[in-house]
Image (cartoon, rainbow, N blue to C red):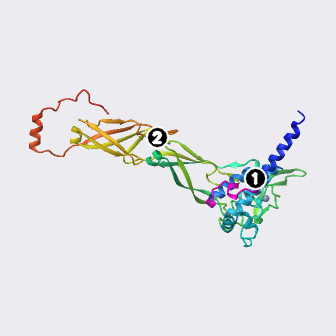
Amino acid sequence: MRRTVPLLLIAVTFAFLLTTLVQAARDFYEVLDVPRDATKTQIKRHFKKLSRVYHPDKNSGDEESAQKFMEIANAYEVLMDDEKRAIYDRYGEEGLKQGGGGRGGANMFHDPFDIFSHFFGGGHRQGQQHQERRGPNIAVPLQVSLEDLYNGAEIEVDVSKQVLCDHCHGSGARKAEDIHTCDVCNGRGIVIKRQQFGPGMIQQFQQTCQKCNGKGKVITHNCPVCNGQKVRRGNENYSITIEKGMHDGHKIVLEEEADEYPETIPGNIIFEVKTAPHPVFERRGNNLYTIQHINLIDALVGFRKTLKQLDNSEVELVREGVTQYGFVQTIPGHGMPFENEPSRKGDLFVEYQIIFPTEIDDETIEFLKKGSKFPAKLPMNHQEL
Ligand SMILES: [Zn+2]
Ligand SMILES: [Zn+2]
């Protein structure tokens, strides 16, 4: 029993050392968990998510988080700068250390905390980070073609939404230095007023600070891009995976991608799958339904034809003898793939409609009358729709 403690200690220390070593050599793309061809939007999104988790304000005194945060901020700074990113891609971190990016002051971020304050509205007002506000979710109907639902697809969707201003990242200020604590209320947002309404009688009341409108902060220079509005209308492109057989009403949630507001965690975008109308097939759950037109001869003597399926394969349609108007042929296993079991498929229903001739000559009429094979009533085996 006595040996367990030191052994455990050694193990923990070793594990910690190992993590530190591994982290030190980690690739910037890995740090931000983005692919090497990631767009700036992708990088920005991942940075925002990670920094919410590792910001030291949330992990008070936790050294590992602090280190992780520095790492994230450092990777972000490099990957958002085209020039630095190009150097990093070619020569790695060493290339950057050797002054490869010999361009002064072009990047506005140097201190990782500065980046954070730009994103989340500046300053580290006490207690604020613990009660984060959350923006509303947005529901977006997503019309998906039947082909994509049949085959599965990766589709690109543009969503118009409110985003934080790229320049001030939602602070509304020109630079971080332009945000000052309000000198009237000392950052509290409220002021105490006293009013005398008689000899020795003083009333004391609180009032929202007029100078800062209760915000506790004053911006001396507004951001030139958004004019201090902090947000703008934007368009964001998302790549969405459509799985084979996704049913109508299936919800695809993109966490924290809804409208952005300053000092607020965005809500989710919720895409709701809706099958788009198709010229040939109609989807009914896991089954497909189609109407095929045949001519009178085919209806009387039978036929063999092919129907192009949603994956461009060919389905054989074979009928022998007479096919009644409106007859529905079931072709098992040629419907939609099952959502969670795509190797299994529903059925395909083919309804036949007969194209009759617009006119018929006397000779044919005489010939047909002679035959007298045409029943006066519907035969017993007539299949209803
Ligand atoms: Zn004030
Ligand atoms: Zn701005």
Label 1 CA crowd tier, 10 Å (few <14, some 14–19, many 20+): few
For the residues labelled 2 and 1, the Cα–Cα distance comes to 44 Å
| Residue 207 in view | no
Please determine whether, in this image, residue 174 is positioned above or below residue 289.
below
Q: Is residue 64 left or right of residue 377?
A: right
Q: Is residue 277 left or right of residue 168?
A: left
**Residue carrying label 2:** 337
Label 2 CA crowd tier, 10 Å (few <14, some 14–19, many 20+): many
Q: Is residue 294 left or right of residue 216?
A: left
Give the mark nearer the N terminus: 2 vs 1: 1
Residue 220 location, x and y as percent? Answer: 75, 66
Residue type indicated by callout 2: Pro
Highlighted range, magenta: 24-40
Circles 2 and 1: CB atoms closer than 8 Å? no
Question: Front-most of 306 and 256?
Answer: 306
Q: Secondary structure at mark 2?
A: strand
Residue 288: name its quadrant: top left
Residue 54 location, x and y as percent? Answer: 75, 51
Q: Secondary structure at mark 1?
A: helix
Residue 165 location, x and y as percent? Answer: 65, 61
Q: Quadrant of the C terminus?
A: top left
Residue 26 location, x and y as percent? Answer: 72, 56
**Residue carrying label 1:** 22
Q: Quadrant of the N terminus?
A: top right
The residue under the point 53% across, 54% down is 157
